[in-house]
Image: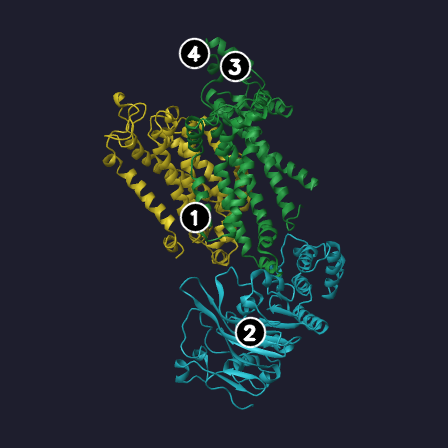
Amino acid sequence: MLAYAIKRIFVLIPTLLAASLLVFVFIHLIPGDPAAVLLGDTATPEEVAQLTREMGLDKPLYTQFVLWLGNFLQGDLGTSIFFQEPVLSVIADGAETSILLAVMTMFWIVIFGVPIGVVSATRHGTWIDQLSSGGAMFAASIPTFWLGLYLILIFSVTLGWLPSSGFPSLSDEGGLTNLRYLLLPSLTLAAPNAALIIRLVRASMLDVQREDHVRTARAKGLHPLRVAYAHVFRNALIAVAAAFGFTFAALVSEAVVTETVFSLPGVGRLVVQSILRRDYPVIQGVILVIVILYMITNLLVDLAYAWLDPRVSLK
Amino acid sequence: MALLEVRNLCIAVGSGGALLPVVEDVSFTVEAGRTLGIVGESGCGKSLTSLAIMGLLEGSQVRITGGEIRFAGRELTKLPAAERRAIMGDQMAMIFQEPMTSLNPVYRIGDQIVEVLRQHRSMSRRDALVRAAELLALVRIPGPAERLKSYPHQLSGGMRQRVMIAMAIACDPSLLIADEPTTALDVTVQAQILDLLADLQARTGMAVVLISHDLGVIAETCQTIAVMYRGRIVESASAAGLFAAPRHPYTSGLMASIPDADADCETLPAIAGRVPRIDERIGGCAFHPRCPRAASRCAIEPPATATYPEDHVVLCHFPEEAAP
Amino acid sequence: MNTLALFNPFSGRRLAFLGLVWLGFILICALAAPLLAPFDPLAIAPVDRLSEPGGSYWFGTDNFGRDTLSRCIYGARMALIIGLGTVAVSLTAGSLIGMLSAYFTRLGHVLMRVIDVLMAFPALLLALVLMTLLERSVANTIIVIGIVYTTTTARILFGMTLKLKNEVFVEAAVCSGAGHCSVLFRHILPNLISPLLVQASFIFAFAQLQAAALDFLGLGLPPEIPSWGNMLSESRIYVTRAPWLLIFPGILIIFSVFSMNLVGDALRDSIDPRFKDDIAGV
């Protein structure tokens, strides 16, 4: 297992290099001179030229890339033009919010997605199934930000139950109760993804239900619940596990939107704001970090897949 | 009293108003320790009959619409689900056509055998594993203790079918239903599996219902034979009686199409026509469009059963009367 | 025959049929927008700003006093353009890349690696990065979302073409001396039309959500264009004062995406079962 993981990591390196090159090149194709943007309208050309030199923006692109990559490998992602702080610490500032948001969202996805999917599959064809699988498709059709705005309108503005924006750190006053700031955002983020998991659990359980070995299990005289759990659901998990990599990608995409809607100080909103501010180093850094996380997720998904399905050999 | 007694069993496909009968008025008995063979082309209803006996139709689009299934004195069709499950896998077990897919790919075979043992016997896991190894030895799997740890995909088709058999006989059933147990296997393996089944039967005294499309397989192993066509039993008799004097033209056709080593291959006779689709309506005798002896009466009037000595029963207007 | 069979899938599915009806309604709104819209969608009426629904403004007005109903109707036009444009870009590029990669193994090694790299970026993130390069415009929004779904389409087509490549009828065509072009486009492609149609309906649905998200983040269509996403984006500050600004465009997006998903789902159940699992819809 470990050897396989290491081997997989080595396979990922070229993809990662290509992705970082892509990020680097993209960012440098952006119209607008970052030095000029940073200094504002009143800057003289001399000041702009000086800043350009200081930031190394006058060097050839490939030199900039090699320098950047070298620094990156040493943990130095450059300095944010906007914050005048190391990119890594800018990202770290947003990490707490984003990680907590992701964990809470995953919690909702598993809590809602899996049981509803199971019930939908075991009650296949009944109104319960039609309601939950139809409802799931409907939920997946709602734009994330619209749902977020609507939840704010209902629970924050009208009912006044929950805060509508921001997130003080857990180490601030309030401690764990500060998590209530993330309740609406995590539910918003969970809705479309839980919907996907419902549809997926349902579809893969229906597939497994048709397989011959389920009939064998029933012929053993097992209780229907035991058949559903130990034979149908257990085997359907293989397909569901494979989808969690995809869910991560969807989660990241929608987190960008959700954090913007709820004004959360997370990494997602940092991406959008950095793009609007043309803060190149931060954009590069964040995106690369996300790509690396995505690849790690996919690796973990593959390992989980092999663990769940003995037919997959880790060679 | 017979171990298994099926009376006027009717099975239909579909839901709501549109019921399509697929098994009609099927009756037979199986005595303890004996073997009944059910033979017929695919789609004749023989597999559905076996699934109905086993109690595996529930939840599908297929259901029993009439008749009785009495097993060891109990009427199975009226039994509550929990009592029905207590019989399944314990007193009555089944093996299936597809050994490649009939085992759950994600569990070790030891665990799959243990599951059925612990379902019906209060056994510790360790005792169950010991028993599972004995069962694997019984079905002649080499190195049974190590094999317990194998996953199904690590075994050949023949081996998997042996595992299925081990699982089926785990609780010493009094009836084993074998639905095309050798169809998916190589010819050499087929013989071994049939041999194994006969051996186990001799050892444990269980009754077997063997379902096959292959009259050759049936001939080798069964004491009584029922021939099915389009959801009905068209002829049933002792194996000796049936082979000595087939009375239904369909049975004669089936027998004629068994390749004979001595015969000239080019003149292998076959039953004329094609197997009708299940939803085609055929009036009178269902076999008449393909029957060499069909008369005008056959297309209009359903035949009644004719009974001959030694429980030889035929469903035909013009059965072959005299033994050749 | 396979394509013809696509017209039956709605027989047993009332909801999918309703979806089709809704999409027809949206299509009519889009085509006949100038006839249906009671006002000019861009006309500003400061006196009537943030009017509640009712009177001459059925759906109310926004912060500039523009008629929400008229903007919704013209928004259907944008939705259609974005959807069709994205489908055109991603299906054309994606099926070319996918088919060529599967057919010419060496080229496939290179192209599919490129696709892998692009797929290492979560969809919206890729769109955001691309959008930073480009001006906000309709064409660029289409291109950017199109590129995102080109990757998935290419991956799917790659798999399906590989399956077909080893089919007897393709080998027969090769053996009888058919050229690469002929094999690819006359023998393989026709078999992929129905799965492509299903894929197209899902892309159409996803594209609406992605475009709306880009609009919302201020990186999609230019703000003056009346798209549903832009309408929602502008209305967020007025949510408490004018909730109708959120309701109408929102419902239009949700119903349209839902309908498209229903249609795609119904279509998927009617295609060649070999390809069913290749297409990931909702």
Chain depicted in yellow:
C
Q: Which residue is mark 3?
A: A52
Q: Quadrant of residue C82?
A: top left
Same subunit, labels 4 and 2: the answer reads: no
Q: Which is closer to the viewer, label 4 or label 2?
A: 2
Q: In whole angstroms, how far apart are the C-alphas of marks 2 and 3? A: 93 Å
Provide the residue designation for mark 2.
B6
Quarter of the rendering occupied by the N terminus of chain B: bottom right
Chain A is which colour? green
Residue C1 in view in this figure: yes
Q: CA distance from mark 4 to mark 2?
A: 95 Å
Query: Residue A156's x, y, as percent?
Result: 45, 27
Label 4 near label 1: C-beta < 8 Å? no
Discs 1/3, front:
1
Residue located 39% across and 23% down the image: C237
The residue that mark 4 highlights is A41
Q: Position of residue C94 (x, y in %)?
A: 46, 42
* Contact flag, marks 2 and 3 (Cβ < 8 Å): no
Q: Are marks 4 and 2 in contact (CB under 8 Å)?
A: no
Give the mark nearest the N terminus, 4 or 3.
Answer: 4
The residue lying toward the viewer, choosing from A153 and A240, is: A153
